Amino acid sequence: MKLLLAPAVVVLAVFAAALGALFRWSVLEFIPGSLRPGGLTLANFRSVLAPQYLDTVWETVLLSAATTLLTLVLSYPVAYALARTPSRRARSALLILTLAPFFTGAIVRTYAWVLVLGNAVVTWPLPMLFTERGVLVGLVHFSMPSMILVLAAALSHIDPAYERAAASLGARPARVFWRVTLPLSMPGVISGGLIVFAWTLSAFATPELLGGGKVKMIANVVKDLGLDSFNWPGAAAFAMVALALTLALLAGLGRLTAGRAA
């Protein structure tokens, strides 16, 4: 039994060491023009609470929430078809289309969206590239395969007899969905929502490329501080604050959704 737990203990030890190193850098003084930090200080955390950084955190939370909601709305019909379609060929085709994005890297997919949103393929009535709208499109596209698979797994465990029984008692399809299917699929909705929300909070490549430097999320600010300004202590402090915020939001969201599901 102890041997089976050994890999997990090693992984936890590595993560703990990495977080310890990150915290150590976050409390060191940043000296402009030098790659060597100074003594201990809490100024880095005070700098993180500046208005421009708080605005970035707020925009990240809003984008993550919008991405989660749109991904859920767009993925649910596909997941329902994947779980309920009687034809094996149709299910196989849907599954292949769902898994196809996993065979291309995030950078490749993002550059493809740069071409699409930049009016190279389609002419948009509103500017899409280098805007929050374009970043939202890329985040939703990247998140949909995971959400579809989680929802399809949850829907496949719902006995269709429940839906047939509700229909036989006179319930219309919309009422069957709201009163039977959706409540029974809430574990998948909660799991998929938490996965998408957590990933979007830490997204980097999609907002970096589709945002063009105009749309900043938490990971982009950490990169700017660490690689552009060489402010490693500031980047570490911002990363620590972002990590704490992410854990707090996920914990609160998990309790809220779990309480409603119960």
Image (cartoon, rainbow, N blue to C red):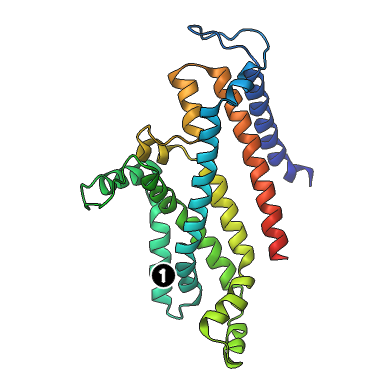
- Is 68 above or below relative to 182? above
**For residue 118, what is the image quadrant?**
top left
Label 1 crowd (10 A; few <14 / some 14-19 / many >=20): few
Residue 243's spot in the image, x, y percent? Answer: 62, 35
Return the residue nearer the eye: 97 or 243: 243
Can you identify the residue that label 1 sits on? 92
Q: How many marks?
A: 1
Residue 188's spot in the image, x, y percent? Answer: 60, 63
Query: Which residue type does callout 1 highlight?
Result: Ser
Residue 244's spot in the image, x, y percent? Answer: 66, 35
The quadrant in which the C terminus is found is bottom right
Return the residue nearer the eye: 133 or 159: 133
- Is 136 above or below relative to 155? above
Judged from the image, the secondary structure of the residue bearing numbered disc 1 is: helix
Extreme residue in the right direction: 1
- Identify the residue at horizontal 69%, vertical 36% (top origin): 12
